[in-house]
Image: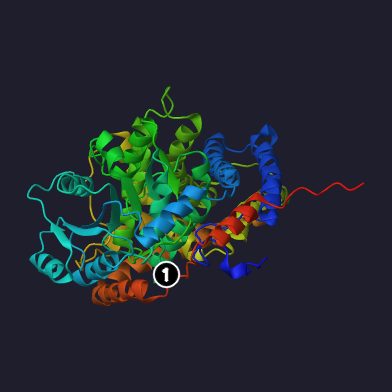
């Protein structure tokens, strides 16, 4: 009997978007649960309650933070690795040999993105293995792109009535094509040569409406791009794999394969909201369809690399999540399971973290300027209760991801005012216009883009100055004032970095465009991981590995 080498096991060799939960992570979660309870008991103890208004705000902010942490841990730990059913391997093998040749339409949605970037995606999509048709869905009416599509030998679709933004563009293409399966790619997301071979076999289950694959950004450089990419990594490595367990994976708008019959049942992509991806997922789940997340990086994209596209992206996502939370009927009796409703609700609750961040950003200034403290306790007591809670929440993420970039914290704080604006507009049902995240090289606003950040920066800077001036005064709680100055200083540094990014961006528009073009080329030029041929022996080995060792034989 031959031995299968470890490097030839079934599955991707690298670029997994999910890693098995380590024992150290599980232990850290257990400890984190204990210190979270310890901290909450401290916050709720009337003996430590300070000013009632600031205490209430802290309770709300920390409550949102704790709820999100608990919900994410629950989602992450719910995921367990299961072997793919034999039918998946069989489909992949038949696709590879050509014995199975379903009709596949690949849609590349375009709306003003630079031609050089679009063509990189077009060529990669056209050259994917497995028979398919590639279509460019041009909502920008570019004659240059139309002519390029003729040269590249791919289909080109343009509509006359530009309604319902990206969802309308896709629906118009659905009416003009007839493939059994529909792949949707953004203009700046480059698929791997084996994208179809790796993802499509999971459609072997006729109840699966769509298969979602991760987004990855290998060319991300600079504060905004790296921060955005890191935040996405958390979502795809920790959250979406867990949602597989609850049949609550939702479409993220790109790198996804739909079954046409499922889309036909709901009359195409959802058009009543700019967040067509999550609402389309809800409609499909309500009708009993399943969704699946493939934890393999099968496409590489370009992250937003300046504040304007990043803020547009974050506003659109937050607004859609709040729409679902307020008007998705998640708390009413529904055909959705309780787990599905909870996971969809979490999408909106997650963005409430920004409201909590804004509250916490103002607290040092409130104490230094007005002497109002939410907690009535000496510094050592507060540190003993708070520090373990904060450290363990960060530690769990770091352990599972294998590291964490500070840029993600800076950009998430930078997006906080944008998320709060989305919350207000969603509450009052204000209509918002859909905009492309990474459209062409238009001008960028400067300081006017970050006026809320400037206000917070000045508030904390003023508080620091006042705090320093009170340190020599008799009766000053030096420890509390010093700690507040330290926290305010951190916020000043973070906000200052965000403001500086806004000031710099308009001066480097040309460099930014060239960097994006190079990033698109890099996304395709980088080698993809080797995918081993799935022979009968390899499949049997993989199934045996997943099943675990056989029970020990009892001897007499």
Looking at the image, the residue that sits furthest to the right is: 556
Residue 47 relative to residue 408: left or right: right
Q: Residue 258 appears at what percent x and percent y?
A: 32, 46
Residue 548 relative to residue 181: left or right: right
Q: Residue 112 appears at what percent x and percent y?
A: 17, 62
Q: Viewer-proximal residue, 464 or 208? A: 208
Callout 1 crowding tier (Cα within 10 Å): few <14, some 14–19, many ≥20? some
Residue 22 relative to residue 254: left or right: right
Compared with 520, 396 (above or below) is: above
Residue at horizontal 10 percent and vertical 59 percent from the top? 141
Q: Residue 350 appears at what percent x and percent y?
A: 46, 44
Compared with 310, 6 (above or below) is: below
**Residue 74 visible from this viewpoint:** yes
Q: Residue 526 appears at what percent x and percent y?
A: 40, 75
Q: Which structural element holds mark 1?
A: loop
Dividing the picture into quadrants, the one containing residue 391 is: bottom right
Looking at the image, the residue that sits furthest to the top is: 333
Looking at the image, the residue that sits furthest to the front is: 1
**Number of numbered discs visible in the structure rendering:** 1
Q: Viewer-proximal residue, 501 or 184? A: 184
Residue 76 relative to residue 433: left or right: right
On the rendered image, what quadrant is the N terminus found in? bottom right
**Residue 475 visible from this viewpoint:** no
Dividing the picture into quadrants, the one containing residue 498 is: bottom left
Residue at horizontal 29 percent and vertical 53 percent from the top? 184
Compared with 267, 234 (above or below) is: below
Pointer 1: what residue?
218
| Colouring | rainbow
Q: Viewer-proximal residue, 486 or 128? A: 128
Q: Viewer-proximal residue, 345 or 523? A: 523
């Amino acid at each position: 009997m031959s031995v299968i080498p470890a490097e030839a096991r079934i599955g991707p060799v690298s670029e997994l978007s999910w890693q098995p939960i380590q024992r150290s992570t599980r232990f850290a979660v257990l400890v984190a649960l204990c210190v979270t309870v310890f901290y909450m008991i401290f916050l709720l103890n009337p003996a430590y309650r300070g000013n009632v208004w600031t205490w209430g705000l802290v309770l709300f902010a920390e409550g949102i933070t704790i709820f999100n942490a608990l919900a994410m841990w629950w989602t992450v730990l719910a995921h367990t690795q299961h072997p793919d059913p034999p039918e998946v391997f069989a489909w992949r093998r038949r696709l590879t040999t050509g014995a199975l040749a379903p009709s596949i339409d690949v849609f590349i949605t375009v709306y003003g993105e630079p031609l050089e970037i679009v063509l990189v995606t077009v060529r990669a999509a056209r050259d994917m293995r497995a028979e398919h048709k590639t279509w460019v869905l041009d909502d920008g009416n570019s004659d240059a792109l139309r002519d390029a599509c003729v040269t590249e030998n791919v289909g080109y679709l343009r509509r006359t009535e530009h309604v319902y933004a990206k969802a309308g563009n896709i629906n118009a293409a659905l009416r003009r094509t007839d493939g059994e399966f529909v792949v949707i790619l953004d203009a700046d997301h480059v698929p791997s040569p084996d994208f179809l071979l790796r993802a499509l076999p999971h459609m072997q289950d006729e109840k699966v409406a769509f298969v979602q694959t991760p987004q990855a950004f290998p060319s991300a450089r600079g504060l905004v791009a790296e921060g955005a990419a890191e935040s996405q990594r958390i979502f795809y490595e920790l959250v979406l794999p867990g949602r597989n367990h609850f049949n609550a994976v939702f479409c993220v708008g790109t790198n996804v394969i739909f079954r046409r019959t499922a889309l036909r049942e709901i009359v195409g992509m959802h058009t009543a909201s700019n967040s067509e991806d999550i609402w389309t997922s809800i409609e499909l789940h309500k009708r009993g369809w399943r969704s699946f997340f493939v934890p393999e990086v099968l496409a590489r994209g370009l992250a937003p690399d300046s504040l304007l596209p990043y803020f547009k992206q974050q506003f659109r996502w937050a607004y859609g999540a709040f729409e679902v939370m307020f008007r998705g009927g998640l708390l009413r009796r529904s055909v959705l399971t309780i787990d599905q409703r909870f996971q969809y609700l979490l999408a909106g609750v997650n963005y409430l973290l920004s409201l909590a961040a804004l509250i916490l950003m103002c607290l040092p200034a409130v104490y230094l300027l007005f002497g109002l403290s939410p907690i009535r306790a000496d510094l050592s007591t507060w540190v003993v209760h708070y520090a373990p809670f904060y450290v363990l929440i960060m530690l769990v993420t770091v352990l599972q991801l294998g590291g964490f970039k500070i840029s993600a914290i800076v950009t998430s704080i930078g997006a906080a005012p944008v998320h709060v604006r989305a919350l207000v507009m969603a509450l009052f049902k204000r209509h918002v216009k859909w905009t492309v995240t990474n459209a062409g090289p238009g001008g960028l606003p400067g300081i006017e883009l970050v006026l809320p950040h400037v206000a917070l920066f000045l508030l904390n800077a003023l508080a620091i100055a006042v705090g320093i001036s009170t340190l020599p005064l008799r009766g000053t709680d030096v420890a509390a004032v010093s700690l507040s100055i330290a926290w305010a200083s951190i916020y000043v540094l973070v906000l200052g970095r965000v403001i500086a990014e806004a000031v710099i961006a308009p001066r480097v528009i040309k460099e930014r465009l060239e960097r994006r073009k190079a990033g698109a080329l890099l996304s395709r030029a980088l080698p993809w991981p080797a995918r081993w041929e799935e022979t009968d022996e390899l499949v049997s080995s993989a199934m045996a590995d997943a099943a675990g060792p056989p029970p020990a034989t009892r001897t007499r």
